[in-house]
Amino acid sequence: MITTIIFDAGGVLTDIKTWEELGSILSKKYHVDKHKTIQLLRKTWRKARVNKISSKLFWRTISDYLGKETHLLRQEITTHHKMRPHMLQLITALKRHYATGLLSNHIEDWLEETIANHHLEKYFDAIVTSYGARAAKPSKAIYRALLREMRKKPEECAFIDDQKENVTAAKKLGMHGIHYRNFTQFKKELSILGITISPRRASR
């Protein structure tokens, strides 16, 4: 029986740009090589998300490369990631009957700002991050960290992520999984798992 629903952040709770999309936008604007920009974004992000480097160093590295002031570049990049209000409405409805968790690969200052700005602690019983666990999805370690935090068994949990490999990893641990592609598809797959949402509470 499913008692717990676990959400990814970027691509599920929020709109996102892929590294390819973001790299293309930045390279055109700042007249730098697109492929080098994408590679730098990915490389530094992967280090920062597990605290191998600080989030401040992530922003400084990118801003130095582009020749942009750090605080201005940070503002520019984060504006591409908007919260989806209908997802928060859905989670509010789910919390009447289920425990909820957030499991995110992210960098510290960015996600902590998002949590504070949108009061995400109200929506989730537990928040486990890659920078806190020092492990990133699809590593088993971060899923296990969340299960320990929530004191749940894998078979009790439904995990939602926009990256298929992360959903596959969750399923291998025994969780139920939904590969998020769009809101309508997501709600249908919740229903297939026996999870029903009030249309009044969770419609767009």
Image: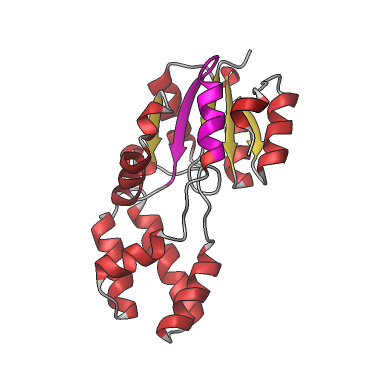
Residue 173 vertical placement versus 37 (above, below): above
Residue 95 is one of the magenta-drawn residues: yes
Which residue shows up at 42% across the image and 66% down it? 41
Give the percent coordinates (x, y) of residue 68.
Answer: 29, 77
The furthest residue to the bottom:
31
* In-front residue for pair 53/97: 97
Name the quadrant of the N terminus.
Answer: top right
Using the image, determine if residue 69 lies above or below residue 42.
below
Residue 188 % position (x, y): 74, 32
Q: How is the image coloured?
A: secondary structure
The residue sitting at 71% across, 19% down in the picture is 194
* In the rendered image, the vertical position of residue 183 relative to residue 37, given as above or below: above
Q: How many marks?
A: 0
Seen from the viewer's position, the closer of residues 176 and 29 is: 29
Q: Which residue is painted at 50% across and 35% down in the image?
A: 88
Q: Residue at horizontal 66%, vertical 41%?
A: 183
Question: Seen in the image, is 46 located left or right of residue 185?
Answer: left
Image coordinates for residue 66, horizontal then vertical, percent: 34, 79
Q: Quadrant of residue 171?
A: top right
Q: Quadrant of the C terminus?
A: top right
On the image, the x and y values in percent for residue 71 come to: 25, 66
Magenta-colored span? 86-105
Quadrant in the rendering for residue 193: top right
Identify the image quadrant of residue 203: top right
* Residue 150 versus residue 104 in the image, above or below: above
